[in-house]
Image (spheres, rainbow, N blue to C red):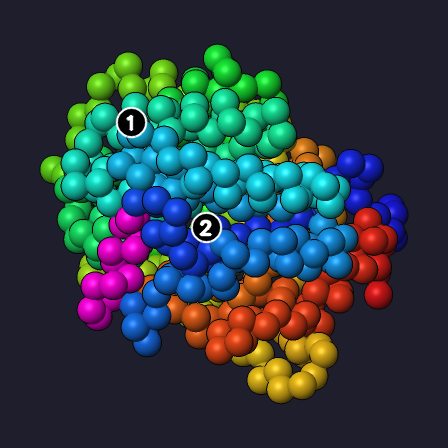
Amino acid sequence: MTLSYRFPAGFVWGAATSAYQIEGSPLADGAGPSIWQRFAHTPGMMANDDHGDIACDHYRRYKDDVQLMRALGLQGYRFSIAWARVLPDGTGRVNPKGLDFYSRLVDELLENGIEPNATLFHWDLPATLDDRGGWLNRDSAHWFAEYAEVMFKALDGRVKRWSTVNEPWVVTDGGYLRGVLAPGHRSKYEAPIAAHNLMRASGAAIQAYRATGRHEIGVVLNIEPKYPASQSPQDLAATRRAHAYMNEQFADPALLGSYPPELQEIFGDAWPDFPAEDFQLTQQPVDFVGINYYTRSVVKHDDEGYPCHATRVRQANVTHTETDWEVYEQGLVDTLMWFKRRYGDLPLYITENGAAFYDPPVAERDVVEDPLRVAYLRKHLRALHQCIEAGVNLKGYYAWSLLDNLEWSLGFAKRFGLYHVDYATLKRTPKASAKFYAKVIETNGASLAE
Ligand code: GBH
């Protein structure tokens, strides 16, 4: 047994962000509006009336932000591309200035020795496409493939790792079932259709990549392991439903070409009869899977629980983050072991992992003390090392997030960054977690023993 936390050679240490959450200037240089631009300006949808008009002003400060990455020693940076900057109407006309922003960002990363990892869709669908039904329209798979191809042609020579869609579960649960995220629909009938079309779109982009691309492409899923609150048959069944709904609903069509039977039980007459040939598209072979891991949930049967007849049981006497998510690093081990068992030995990346905690005001200090975030990262990185020793084919890790940013409808109050952002001045200040992570990177994990 080794007592060293050193990671394998070639392991990629990175950090992640997404376009609408950090860029600001959403309509600059000919960009079209996205559904998040619309949603954020719909009264009542955003905490504190926050919106992404300025956010971290990364669109204009990207060169400075690349220097922050360099100070961390990042080897990889995962960002997303705002579809409506590149194709203002979602399809058709390409906006060269929008494309140029990402081209300049990629050049800047490469010049600083940082590997770009581009995500094509992190929730900011062009508003024009939403007017045509958005993810409810089966044509969305073709729209997405068209956009993906534009990006591959422009950047595949320089971007060697692509992701199709980020966390389709969040898009469909928040955006189509509960109405708390863009586009703000609440329909049990719509959610499974949007989910299915997102997975068709992901597959269509992968298919397009095989024709034009020369490197790697995968899909990014949020996986949250579910544990039963008791061994009662009701709680066990509720746990299986919650797991099928959040985890297998997306991983299964992508990797097995089918849906788990629990979905029919959950959605009842709202569960569509999907054409069998669709699964050829959803199951295009991936080069890797990106897993976003934040927390677990403990689940009990609850007749009122929507849509799974299940609810989360909040655990007493354990640390929760500012978003009230339980800190549970064993869930990361259980997730990766489950993934390997169910889907085989695919190359995996942790494409997001991190936590919102209260950070004390910065004032003139040069470091923001965030001991809870440091503890969170240390525990999860040690857990990852354990997974690698147990044979998980893990290729890299991207901390969420480089910067404090717009936490969607929760606004700017929930801070996930390694760098603190003062939204009045846009000044970035490193947190203790940034120093901690820089040392992990520098020692390739060995400092995790401390
Ligand atoms: C990700 O989503 C997003 O990709 C990213 O944009 C976002 O900023 C980041 O994470 C932080 O939120 O209430 O205990 O049942 C996170 C996905 C899904 C993780 C819901 C937590 C609920 C936990 N989240 N899940 S619980």
Location of the C terminus by quadrant is bottom right
Q: Quadrant of residue 180?
A: bottom left
Is 67 rendered above or below residue 154? below
How many other residues sit within 10 Å of disc 2, few (<14), some (14-19) or many (≥20)? many
Q: Is residue 397 visible?
A: no
Q: CA distance from mark 1 to mark 2?
A: 21 Å
Tag 1 residue: 92
Q: Quadrant of residue 248?
A: top left
User: Exactly how many numbered labels are in the figure?
Assistant: 2
Tag 2 residue: 19
Residue 116 pos. (x, y %): 62, 39
| Farthest-out residue, left | 269
Q: Residue at x 17, y 53 (%)?
A: 186
Q: Amino acid at mark 1?
A: Gly
Asked if ligand 1 lies within 8 A of label 1, the reply is: no
Q: Nearer the viewer, residue 188 or 96?
A: 96
Q: Is residue 398 visible?
A: yes
Q: Quadrant of residue 148?
A: top left
- Would residue 382 be found to the left or right of residue 49 on screen? right
Is 311 rendered above or below residue 173? below
SS at mark 2 in the image: helix
For marks 1 and 2 on the same chain, the one whose residue lies earlier in the sequence: 2
Residue 337 pos. (x, y %): 60, 40
Q: Residue at x 71, y 72 (%)?
A: 432
Q: Nearer the viewer, residue 140 or 285?
A: 140
Q: Residue at x 25, y 58 (%)?
A: 39
Residue stretch in magenta? 33-45
SS at mark 1 in the image: loop
How many other residues sit within 10 Å of disc 1, few (<14), some (14-19) or many (≥20)? few
- Would residue 213 be found to the left or right of residue 201 on screen? right
Q: Amino acid at mark 2?
A: Ala
Is 389 rendered above or below residue 5? above
